[in-house]
Image (spheres, rainbow, N blue to C red):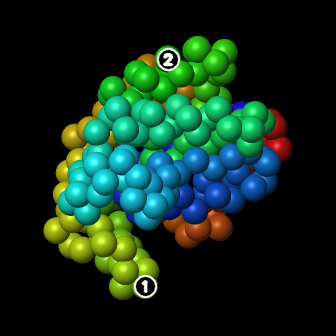
Amino acid sequence: MILIFLGPPGSGKGTQAKLLAEKLKIAHISLGDLLREEVRIGSVIGKQAKAMMDAGKLVPDELTIELAQNRIKKDDCRRGFIMDGFPRSAAQADAFDKMLAQNKLTLGAAVYFAVDEEPLVKRLLLRAQLEGRADDTESVIRTRFEVYAKQTAPLIEHYKKIGKLVEIDAARPIDQVTKELFALEAIASVL
Ligand code: ADP
């Protein structure tokens, strides 16, 4: 089972991806986590990515595409995986379509976590206080939403067009979103 989780910053897709990946015994691939790890170990990719991440902008497509490409080849992806935070641009979506085709893999669904922006900004500011992430200040949060609207939101149309989009209401409490997610036809059929 191969899934893409799509949605604005703070929509809870990371939390839900972790839960669902455990349930389905598939890999959870968070591009944000992969990038933060590159920054932590001080790799070439990490060094190129850090400034963009701190500013709330997308790191260059070729870096994230390379990370994603290498990651899906690992053993723990053989049963499938959830892509959380990738693709995030048209070029990444294109590259991902090609990656899947080259590896003879089929996308199960792109799950869109639909939720309004204002409550999310509040959610992220609260998370900033709790976790102290460098990209969680108010102005960086605003930039991340602008980047999302401009570069990532158009992917919703892409997956709709190819008949892979499913939408869930991400404004509700975590456990209710989980319930709705597990009940989606594409997912319930393999549980
Ligand atoms: P969130 O979903 O809350 O915005 P993430 O942890 O997914 O946070 O990502 C943090 C940052 O990492 C992003 O703001 C961006 O700079 C970078 N990033 C993550 N995924 C990608 C991607 N697919 N393409 C480009 N940059 C990315």
Above or below, 27 against 117 in this view is: above
Residue 21 against residue 164 in the figure, above or below: below
Classify residue 53 as left or right of residue 110. Answer: left
Circle 2 residues within 10 Å: few <14, some 14–19, many ≥20: few
Residue type indicated by callout 1:
Leu
Q: Residue at x 24, y 53 (%)?
A: 52
Q: Is residue 54 left or right of residue 189?
A: left
Q: From the viewer's perspective, is residue 8 above or below residue 106? A: below
Image spot of residue 46 (x, y percent): 37, 53
Which residue is at the front of the view, 45 or 27? Answer: 45
- Crowd tier of the residue under label 1, counting other residues whose Cα lies within 10 Å: few below 14, some 14–19, many 20 or above: few
Q: In front here: 165 or 55?
A: 55
Q: Does residue 126 appear in the picture of this structure?
A: no
Looking at the rendered image, the quarter that the C terminus falls into is top right
Determine the secondary structure under disc 1. Answer: helix
Q: Position of residue 182 (x, y in %)?
A: 71, 50
Mark 2: amino acid = Lys
Question: In the structure shown, which secondary structural element does the residue marked by tag 2 occupy?
Answer: helix
> Considering the image in quadrants, where does the N terminus appear?
top right
Residue occupying image coordinates x 31% and y 54%: 47
Q: Position of residue 51 (x, y in %)?
A: 23, 57
Per the image, the residue denoted by label 2 is 98
Between the C-alphas of marks 2 and 1, the distance is 39 Å
Give the residue at x 37% y 80%.
132
- Of residue 131 and residue 178, the one placed in the foreground of this image is 131
Quarter occupied by residue 91 = top left
Looking at the image, residue 26 lies above or below residue 10: above
Q: Residue at label 1?
A: 130
Tell me if I can see residue 17 in this picture.
yes
- Ligand 1 neighbours mark 1 (CB distance < 8 Å): no
Residue 16 shows which numbered tag?
A: none
**Extreme residue in the bottom direction:** 129
